[in-house]
Image (cartoon, grey):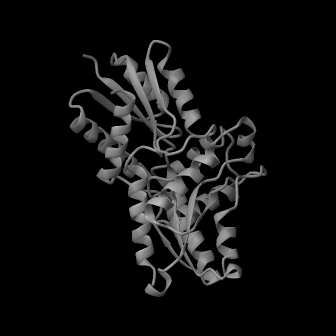
Amino acid sequence: MSKIGVLVMAYGTPGSREEVEPYYTRIRHGRPPTQEQLDDLIRRYEAIGGISPLNELTQAQVAGIAQGLEELAPGRFDVRFGSKYTSPSIEETAAAFVADGITEVVGLTLTPHAASMGSAEYMERAKTALGPDIDFHPIMYWYDTPGFLEILADKVRVAIASLPTSLQANPLVLFTAHSLPVRILESGDTYPEQLADSAQRIADLAGLSRHEVAWQSAGRTPDPWLGPDILEVIAALPARDEHALVICPVGFVADHLEVLFDVDIDAQRVAAESGVTLARTTSLNADPAFTTVLAKRVLQECP
């Protein structure tokens, strides 16, 4: 019996300093960045050690999903990675599946929530590249897969426990995800509702008395982006008599620029300036408990 392909997709990141400029040009749809924009991105990479660890972490996540599927359904799945902006691309991996005679493929993005400018774009590219003869199963979102939110609830509890004892009683917990342009709402995009649902479910599981949702990492464009912005929320906390904060970047599944810089450096800077003690939940990365959840979600699609 022919194996079922699993096309795991993610954004991708440059693997070296030399790859930063061509990568930036690709994510700008062929428009080279200005020198100021390029210098700013390089500055942020240097602040987290020179380059993002995302490529290695993504490879480990894909390997973990493959291992999970092999344990759950031996010999049934062929798991491969395709990137939106780096190599191997979504199209290259899709072509390899077709060339190898795979006739059924599951599409899985490494982002929990669906958005018209997120998973929908990945799935459309994959479907087009695979062609009409492939039976394609797109998993548009998976945040509600059993086990996923439970893992994050545990991480929230651990992060709260990492605060100074005097601040552990009732800290504000802020759930964040990557902001997108407000125009996505015109088409009925439910991305914000999915984030709110994730936050409420985690809060219930963790026994939180209160929590809020904020957005981070908005693009540097003139368009209005979803808010409130995480930095604005943090800066306003002292006026609310809030001095302890836990951030759970629920929209991200690995340590990369949006977590290691935007939260660990930028948000921590604003928190320190505002007299707020900030703790962050640890990232999922290649935790076997997490990759097993994704393997089980693939099995739900092809039982």
How many numbered dots are placed on residues in this image?
Answer: 0
From the viewer's perspective, tell me whether residue 26 is left or right of residue 253.
right
The N terminus, quarter of image: top left
Q: Is residue 174 visible?
A: yes
- Residue 3 image point, x, y percent: 29, 22
Nearer to us in this view, 31 or 217: 217
Kindly indicate the quadrant of the structure image that contains residue 38.
Answer: bottom right
- The residue drawn where x is 41% and y is 69% is 157
Please determine whether, in this image, residue 186 is positioned above or below residue 45. Answer: above
Please determine whether, in this image, residue 156 is positioned above or below residue 223. Answer: below
From the viewer's perspective, tell me whether residue 43 is left or right of residue 37.
left
Kindly indicate the quadrant of the structure image that contains residue 6.
Answer: top left
From the viewer's perspective, tell me whether residue 118 is left or right of residue 286.
right
- The residue drawn where x is 38% and y is 38% is 297
Please determine whether, in this image, residue 105 is positioned above or below residue 12. Answer: above
- The residue drawn where x is 61% and y is 43% is 27
- Residue 288 image point, x, y percent: 29, 51
- Residue 150 image point, x, y percent: 39, 55
Nearer to us in this view, 172 or 57: 172
- Residue 8 image point, x, y percent: 42, 36
Q: Is residue 51 visible?
A: no
The C terminus, quarter of image: top left
From the viewer's perspective, tell me whether residue 245 is left or right of residue 158.
right
Nearer to us in this view, 13 or 149: 149
- Residue sitting farthest toward the top: 133
